[in-house]
Amino acid sequence: MSRVLIVGAGLTGSLCAYLLKRVLQSKAQLVVWDKARGAGGRMSTSRPPDPTSHSADLGAQYITATAAYAQSHSNFYTELLSAGLLKPLDCHIEGLQHKEGNKNYVTPLGTSSVVKHFLSESGNHTFLIFCLNNVPPVLQWGNGI
Ligand SMILES: Cc1cc2nc3c(=O)[nH]c(=O)nc-3n(C[C@H](O)[C@H](O)[C@H](O)COP(=O)(O)OP(=O)(O)OC[C@H]3O[C@@H](n4cnc5c(N)ncnc54)[C@H](O)[C@@H]3O)c2cc1C
């Protein structure tokens, strides 16, 4: 079985894991490394001990889909909307320059919920807190990786 290492559990890494899982199914074992304690990257959400009270997005505040992306990636937006992870942003944001055709979405459960959705949909991979400091020509696999 092939083993695939994805470094970084932000939106890019989580979507990569999700898409690879869809293509490779059980033909590959995915491992995701991130130097941080949790997934999210620049779409991280901080939560207090009682997570139902409030949360704070530490990076992205909302998601913008250009007209072209809304069309080419419509399946992703549909999936996230039907899972309740995205909702159309329908209030006024001071300073936001609206571009014709762009759609803005908020994330009711925090922006990290989008990243976590793609990670969890990518199946039974291993998430490790690990910082990659250099990339050797051939990664030596071992010790459970
Ligand atoms: C303040 C702010 C506001 C933003 N607002 C918006 C917005 O309103 N709308 C919008 O659409 N976008 C917004 N963005 C942009 C959006 O957050 C990013 O484009 C997106 O999250 C990038 O995802 P990524 O996975 O490519 O990178 P990242 O989220 O940066 O993920 C990279 C991950 O790799 C990990 N990593 C890095 N190096 C290593 C290493 N050597 N070893 C192991 N792990 C490593 C990091 O810990 C991180 O988790 C905003 C960003 C910021 C910072």
Image (tube, grey):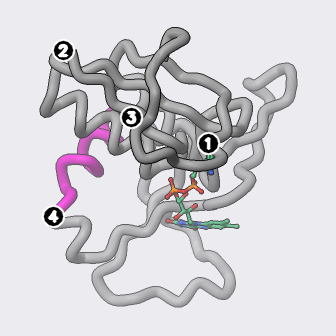
N-terminal of the pair, mark 2 or mark 3, is: 2
Q: Amino acid at mark 4?
A: Ser
Q: Element type at marker 3?
A: helix
Q: Label 4 vs label 3: CA separation?
A: 18 Å
Left or right, residue 71 beside residue 29:
left
Left or right, residue 56 beside residue 19:
right
Q: Label 4 vs label 2: CA separation?
A: 27 Å
N-terminal of the pair, mark 3 or mark 1, is: 3
- Establish if 24 lies above or below 101: above
Question: Which residue matches tag 2?
Answer: 26
Whether the residues at callouts 4 and 1 have beta carbons within 8 Å, the answer is no
Whether the residues at callouts 4 and 2 have beta carbons within 8 Å, the answer is no
Left or right, residue 58 beside residue 67:
right
- Mark 3 C-beta to ligand 1 under 8 Å: no
- Residue 37 sits in which quadrant? top right
- Residue 67 sits in which quadrant? bottom left
Which dot, 2 or 3, sits closer to the camera?
A: 2
Q: Is residue 66 visible?
A: yes
Q: Nearer the viewer, residue 26 or 99?
A: 26
Q: Label 2 vs label 3: CA separation?
A: 17 Å
Q: Label 4 vs label 1: CA separation?
A: 33 Å
Question: Which residue matches tag 3?
Answer: 118
Which dot, 2 or 1, sits closer to the camera?
A: 1
Residue at the image point whose x is 66% and y is 87% from the top? 95
Residue at the image point whose x is 13% and y is 33% from the top? 23
Residue 72 is tagged as 4
Q: Position of residue 69 (x, y in %)?
A: 25, 69
N-terminal of the pair, mark 2 or mark 1, is: 2
N-terminal of the pair, mark 4 or mark 2, is: 2
Question: Which residue matches tag 1?
Answer: 132
